[in-house]
Image (cartoon, rainbow, N blue to C red):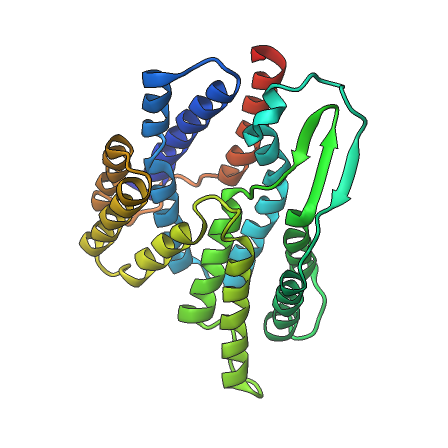
Amino acid sequence: MMSAFTIKLIAMLSMLTDHAGYILMLAGRTRGDMYMLLRSIGRPAFVLFAFLIVNGCEKTSDMKRYLSRLVIFALVSQPAYSLAFTPENYRAPLFSAAPTAELMSVSPAAAALVAFVVLVYLWCVCAWRVDASLLWLCAALILPYVQLEAFGLVILGDGLNVFYTLGVSLALIGALLKGLSTGGAYKDVRRWAVLLAAVAAAALVHARADYGLFGVALILGLYLTRRSRAAQAAVMLLWCFAEYYVRMHYVQLMLFAMLAVLPVLFYSGRRGPRARGFYWIYPLHLYAFSLAGILLLR
């Protein structure tokens, strides 16, 4: 039987292998079968992380704090994500351009959605008190519209890291199933407002975040079936089939991704050793891998 700590280790090793393969490809150091093998080994990672988020959601006593932690790591990880996964970073000469920063054009609809999410969070979660979690949320909603280049490298670009996907999923779980809005005047209005704000946040990030709404759907499916390991395994298998065979037409990727069901079926329910600093592995390895690729492998 496996503890949550063991599943975290498996997910982490899978993720590291996947990202190493992708960055080696961008740096022109791997192609063909070796590239596909490394990416295939990485396919169980997101499925396992989705399971761990649901497991953490079940065990947490403070949903607001849990969500704030994901928001903070979304911010911390974004420069690392852009450095690692922007192809131009491995081709353009270093120090070829002066640092530039600009705000992307924001549609009125996107601006309205951002304002709505912030207002609902301030009302329903913070009770009209400005706290650190609200400031982190504002920064996370604004950052996707900032582009930053320095020393010929894209520091902030178009794509959004996986913590955005995880954070939106947790917000939807909190709004739809756990009820972040409780009691007080306008109780029903508050509940609907929180739900609509979570949906608005999903709409803001779905086209740019890793796995997008498909990833959100997996996490919600795992939460809805959380009382049965067999049902969760079935959700995982169905998602892997839809994501990698129906959408991408890669049987190999699908089969490797489906291996994620094994740790879940053998999960004992125990936490195991405390994995302090686990979230830091994501941004730190992206910084290390991308800088190694940019400085040593180009």
Q: Where is residue 32 drawn, in percent x and y?
A: 35, 17
In the displayed orientation, state which residue is furthest to the bottom: 185
Which residue is found at the position 47% from the left and 51% from the top?
A: 166
- Indicate the quadrant containing the N terminus: top left, top right, bottom left or bottom right: top left
Which residue is found at the position 63% from the left and 69% from the top?
A: 116
Q: Where is residue 30 drawn, in percent x and y?
A: 43, 15
Q: Is residue 7 above or below residue 178?
A: above
Give the number of marks.
0
Q: In this rendering, would 188 be left or right of 147?
A: left
Q: In this rendering, would 131 be left or right of 24?
A: right
Q: Is residue 45 above or below residue 209?
A: above
Which residue is found at the position 77% from the left and 39% from the top?
A: 101
In the figure, residue 259 lies in which quadrant? top left
Q: Is residue 38 above or below residue 149?
A: above
- Indicate the quadrant containing the C terminus: top left, top right, bottom left or bottom right: top right
Which sits in the foreground, 123 or 215?
Answer: 215
> Can see residue 148?
yes
Which residue is found at the position 58% from the left and 88% from the top?
A: 185
Q: In this rendering, would 86 be left or right of 63?
A: right
Q: Where is residue 47 drawn, in percent x and y?
A: 34, 43
> Can see residue 62?
no
Q: Is residue 286 above or below residue 221?
A: above
Which sits in the foreground, 46 or 5?
Answer: 46
Q: Where is residue 220 drawn, in percent x and y?
A: 36, 59
In the displayed orientation, state which residue is furthest to the right: 98
